[in-house]
Image (cartoon, grey):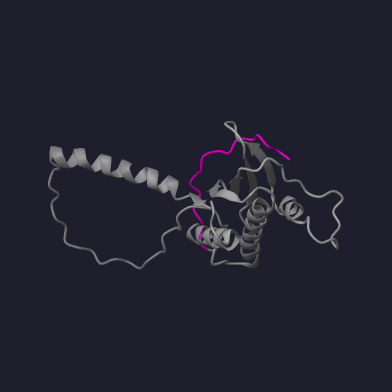
Amino acid sequence: MSTTRPWPPPGDSGPQPGGSASCGTPSPVARGPVPARPSVPAEPPSAGTAASAEPAAEAHAPAAAAARTRRLRLVDVSGAVPMARDFTRAALTDWGWLPALTADHRAAAEDVLLVVSELVTNACLHADGPEELRVSCADKVLRLEVTDLGAGAPAPRNPHRAGRPGGHGMFIVQRLCLDWGVVRNENGAGKTVWAELAAPS
């Protein structure tokens, strides 16, 4: 289990219709031929027009990057677990994971929602409630982070017994995720529990 591996900034790996699901903006749908229009001589751009075009393009760049990281405040909310699931489901829909194209895509999305439920539930039961959920996606890896002010560290119960009530949450996280870990807050109490899952191939 890694606890210090850095998380790269979200990249741009848009979902491919009919192919692997990743995070980004869906590819444009192919359309039929567009009738040709009479050519109109282009006017040379004025100095003011050229100067205003470049800042406008720059203004859209940060918004595109921010769209692949979502944050949800969960302090003192009622129904934190279903709220977190609905929030994550909306992000997966925007990023092309849902609606699922294949059984593998559906299973990958269900795994993400199950891990979100387990992480938020663990914070509710053992850390006085979650503070924030962060969902990020880059390079076909989806990362979930749940922050809280609890002092303890979650760990799978060992040995794990399937028939015993309780204690299965972190075992499920460990089985479904590529990696997971705990990062302590440097400035005081609290921690971030994170988990990473692969996008469907």
Horizontally, residue 160 falls left or right of residue 72, namely right
Report if residue 117 is visible in the image: yes
Choose between 42 and 155: the one closer to the eye: 155
Choose between 31 and 51: the one closer to the eye: 51
Q: Quadrant of residue 53?
A: top left
Choose between 59 and 190: the one closer to the eye: 190
Position of the C terminus, as image quadrant, is bottom right
Which residue does the image show at 16% across and 42% down from the upper left? 49
In magenta, the rendered stretch is 1-17
Across and down, in percent, residue 14 comes to 49, 53
Choose between 102 and 194: the one closer to the eye: 194
Magenta portion: prevailing SS class: loop
Q: Is residue 82 above or below residue 75?
A: below
Q: Is residue 147 above or below residue 93?
A: above
Across and down, in percent, residue 10 comes to 51, 43
Horizontally, residue 45 falls left or right of residue 195, namely left
Horizontally, residue 68 falls left or right of residue 123, namely left
